[in-house]
Image: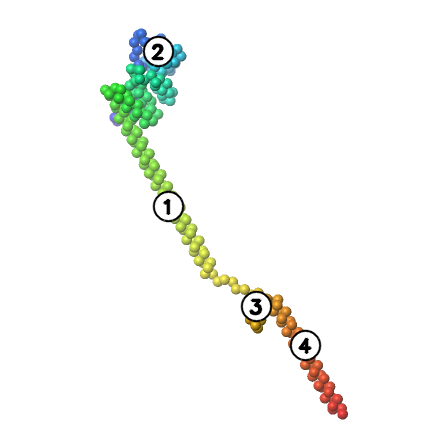
Amino acid sequence: MYLKKIIAAFAALVLVLPLSAQQEKREVRSGNRAFRSKNYNEAEIDYRKGLVKDSTSFISAYDLASSLYMQKDYENAARTLDKVADQLPQSEYASRWYFNKGNIALQQQDYKTAVDAFKQALLLDPEDLQAKESYIYAKEKLKDRQDGQNQQDGQNQQDNQNQQDDQNKQNDQNQQDDQTQQDDQNQQPQPQPNDDQQPQQDPAGQQISPQQAQQMLKAIQAKEKETQEKVEKAKAQQAQTRRKENNW
């Protein structure tokens, strides 16, 4: 509830700077009247006219940033303030410039910039209670974000580690499956060559090819046939000789 009150008060704390009658220009006075009537777009137009006449006017730039802030155009509001940042050392409104810059940064959720801006506002005006409350709030928001980021980083790191562990387990399982498959293949009986395909050995123990063995077999059979024919021929001659002897 306390923080919600601070947030609700931020918009109301963006004030148009007071000017003496001698300092005010016509456009700035017109813009101030429109701003107080909450006609922020009309006030913006008047302040821009003032900057056209004097592009270095700190007051016109500051008030233009205020009107842009009230229209929730935070990016252009911050850019407008930055254009006169080099005039801060000479400006009596430097603390309010930093205060408004902090408010804009809060709306953009740029908590680091907001903390730095509110800190500068307090250094220039230590009695500014609004700046002090805003500084405390911005620091809390920055701490919450950093804690959340650290927690997210830790979760991401844990997720990455879990993913790496799962990958390592899968690699180990794949290696184990490959080894099991290799072991199964090694245990299977290896096919033996056919006898017809095996090289033969001659009586001397020298290996010969199947073709050579076939040729040798044919040669042996031919030799046996020749021997058989000789034996038959010798028997026939003996029988003929006996018949001749009997005829005598």
Mark 3 or mark 1: name the one nearer the start of the chain. Answer: 1
> Can you tell which mark lies on residue 207?
3
Dot 2 falls on a residue whose secondary structure is helix
Left or right relative to 162: residue 223 = right
Q: Where is 29 relative to 70, above or below?
A: above
The residue that mark 1 highlights is 165
Q: Position of residue 44 (x, y in %)?
A: 37, 15
Query: How far apart are the two marked residues, 4 and 2, measured between alpha carbons?
Result: 142 Å
Mark 2 — residue? 28
Q: CA distance from mark 2 to mark 3?
A: 119 Å
Circle 4 packing at 10 Å, graded few (<14), some (14-19), many (20+), is: few
Task: Answer with mark 2 or mark 3, whichever residue precedes in sequence.
Answer: 2
Reply above or below: 156 against 189: above
x and y percentages locating residue 148 in the rendered image? 32, 34
CA gap, disc 2 and disc 1:
67 Å
Q: Position of residue 50 (x, y in %)?
A: 37, 11
Nearest-to-viewer mark from 4 and 2: 4
Q: Amino acid at mark 4?
A: Glu
Which residue appears at 30% of the width and 34% of the height? 147
Label 2 Cα neighbours within 10 Å, binned few <14 / some 14-19 / many ≥20 = many
Question: Quick one: quadrant of the N terminus?
Answer: top left
In the structure shown, which secondary structural element does the residue marked by tag 1 occupy?
Answer: helix
Determine the residue located farthest toward the top in the rendered image.
22
